Image: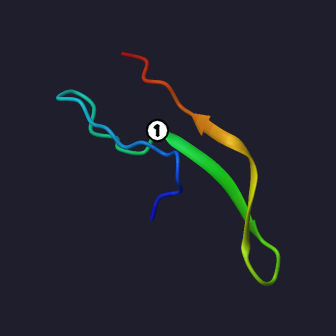
Amino acid sequence: MLLPGISVTTKPTGYRVNKQFQMVRFDGERWEKIGTIITDEDKE
């Protein structure tokens, strides 16, 4: 389950697929996005 705008990639030495995240909250009826997409950059 990915949100629009989230990309998925792997490298031969890096197997972590999820490097982008977006916080969401449930308002009792639907999920609401909070802020923008957060990217965790590789340190390689």
Q: Is residue 7 left or right of residue 38?
A: left
Type of amino acid under label 1: Lys
Q: Nearer the viewer, residue 10 or 16?
A: 10
- Residue most toward the top? 44
Quick one: which residue is furthest to the bottom in this view? 29
Q: The residue tagged with tag 1: helix, strand or loop?
A: loop
Tell me, what colour scheme is on the image?
A: rainbow
Looking at the image, which is closer to me, 13 or 22?
22
Determine the residue located farthest toward the front in the rendered image.
4
Quadrant in which residue 27 is drawn:
bottom right
Labels in figure, total: 1
Q: Position of residue 13 (x, y in %)?
A: 21, 27
Asked whether, in this view, residue 21 is left or right of residue 34, the answer is left
Residue 37 in the image, given as x and y percentages of width and height? 63, 41
Residue at x 69% of width, y 53% of height = 23
12 w.r.t. 29: above or below: above
Q: In the orientation shown, which residue stands out farthest toward the left?
A: 12
Q: Residue at x 46, y 38 (%)?
A: 19
Residue 29 position, x and y percent, is 77, 84
Q: Quadrant of the N terminus?
A: bottom left
Quadrant of residue 17 in the image? Answer: top left
- On the image, numbered disc 1 is attached to which residue? 19
Q: Nearer the viewer, residue 23 or 5?
A: 5
For the C terminus, the quadrant is top left
Q: Is residue 33 above or below residue 5?
A: below
Q: Residues within 10 Å of mark 1 (few under 14, many from 20)?
A: some
Name which residue lies at 27% across and 39% down.
15
